[in-house]
Image (cartoon, rainbow, N blue to C red):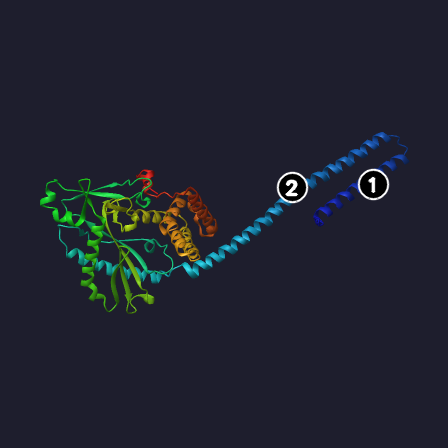
Amino acid sequence: MPVYSLNLKVFWLLVIILFTGIWCTFLSFRRYDNNEDGGCQEKPFISLQLFFKLGLVLLVCFIVFRCWRSSPKCQHGDHNLTFQQQHKQLVRKNLLETFYEQHIKLSPHVLGHSKAHVSQIVGELIRVGKAKQHDTGVIFRGDFIQIGSAYEQHKINSPDCFDILVPLKMPLSLKLEPFFANPGKDLVPVLHGSMKCRVAAPKKSEWVKTYKQFSDCFCTEVDLHHMLSSTSVLKWFHWKILRCLNVIRYQFEERCYITLSVSDDKLILKILPRSDYVCCHISMSVRLIPAFHLGDSVFLTAQPWNNTTNLEGLNLDSYWGINLSKYEQKLLNWFKDQAPSNSCHLKCLQIMKSLRDLNAKTFHPPLSSQWRSIFCSYNLKTALFYLLLKISFEKWDDSLLMDRMADYFMFLKECLQKEALMHFFLVLIAPAEHIL
């Protein structure tokens, strides 16, 4: 059986209405008795007046009761509900802020020293590599470009991993002719959005006479065209960096121990401090990525395709990735200038990456790998780019962190349901079927 409880507010309202009605009735009868003593014989008129007053009193009481029930009560209930929601939101925000400060946020001092040390070593490598090179092959352009989360201010965990883009140049007489590749909708989805790069000489006859050595070292022939080989460029780049490292190693032997390793065809420069030159003695890994500048801050990067990706005889040697890191940095810098000074957009990205890592630890290795690949840092950053243009600047204030995190989760949920997250920049310049 249902249990009923007395609502004191309704009870006392009804008591007031009841006593008001009794009081009005008493006054009406008293006037009626006085009129009888005075000899007045207008009983029908007095009865009508009595009923009119009683009806008016009841109507007023009914209106007051309805207004009290509909407006004040609902407003009071909504106020209580809003207060509870705000309290829960505040508790969650405080927990999230504590988690961010203790486990996610990096020390700007340590990160700054680490980036400076990496820049010094890589800069010396590039200087030596540019000084000792031949014009007949691929050469260093002479600079390097810092990309990735460490330089976009949203790195998490420890400042121990850095990505460096090393621009390369072709011989002056050769020209690169890149174009978007189309391996097919159902064939190797990872290749959608990648490019091929044809190498053009002033005359076709010169390939045999003048550029035979270059063709043998850096090109692969596809449909009677000379395609720039990403595998060959990677091998040459590994050999070149190793030679440069042997030259400069003695300069840093008192400060740190430097080694070069290849992991999944990725060239990793390992830096292990030997003294207090680097704060906290952090062991750093620097990924060096060879790239060709296409113009307007767009680069072609040599991709370390795994052998397992080579399906149905597809020659992956001629496929290149397209890198738009400079545009990503420009977008983040532009948004930083437009948004409030305490904007939480980078904090949201850092929290999402940290939650991804925490959830990955609860899965078995195969599922954990898939989880990390789906919610990789680049996909999470791409989702943030869409939200930055979707939500107005002032709504990214740090006080609205929980609301923006909710928007972040909902956007990722929609992408998972649609099974699609379009590249933020390539979708503007390439057909949709080329990008997955």
Residue 61 x %, y %: 73, 40
Label 1 neighbour load within 10 Å: few <14, some 14-19, many 20+: few
Residue 157 x %, y %: 38, 59
> On the picture, is 139 further left or further right than 403?
left
Please, which residue is most extreme toward the left here?
209
Q: Is residue 249 visible?
A: yes
Which dot marks residue 70? 2
> On the picture, is 426 further left or further right than 132?
right
Of 96 and 373, the residue lying toward us: 373
Q: Please name the amino acid that badge 2 sits on.
A: Ser
Residue at 13%, 53% in the rendered image: 134
Label 2 neighbour load within 10 Å: few <14, some 14-19, many 20+: few
Q: Please name the amino acid that badge 1 sits on.
A: Phe
> Which residue corresponds to mark 1?
26
Of 334 and 140, the residue lying toward us: 140
Snapshot quadrant of residue 391: top left
Using the numbered discs, state the Cα–Cα distance from disc 2 to disc 1 in whole angstroms: 31 Å
Residue 282 x %, y %: 32, 65
Judged from the image, the secondary structure of the residue bearing numbered disc 2 is helix
Residue at 34%, 47% in the rendered image: 331
Q: Is residue 343 visible?
A: no
Residue 325 x %, y %: 30, 49
- Relative height, residue 246 to residue 218 (above, below): below
Image quadrant occupied by the C terminus: top left
> On the picture, is 192 further left or further right than 357?
left
Q: Earlier in the sequence, mark 2 or mark 1?
A: 1
Snapshot quadrant of residue 27: top right
Q: Nearer the viewer, mark 2 or mark 1?
A: 2
> On the picture, is 419 further left or further right than 116?
right
Of 349 and 40, the residue lying toward us: 349
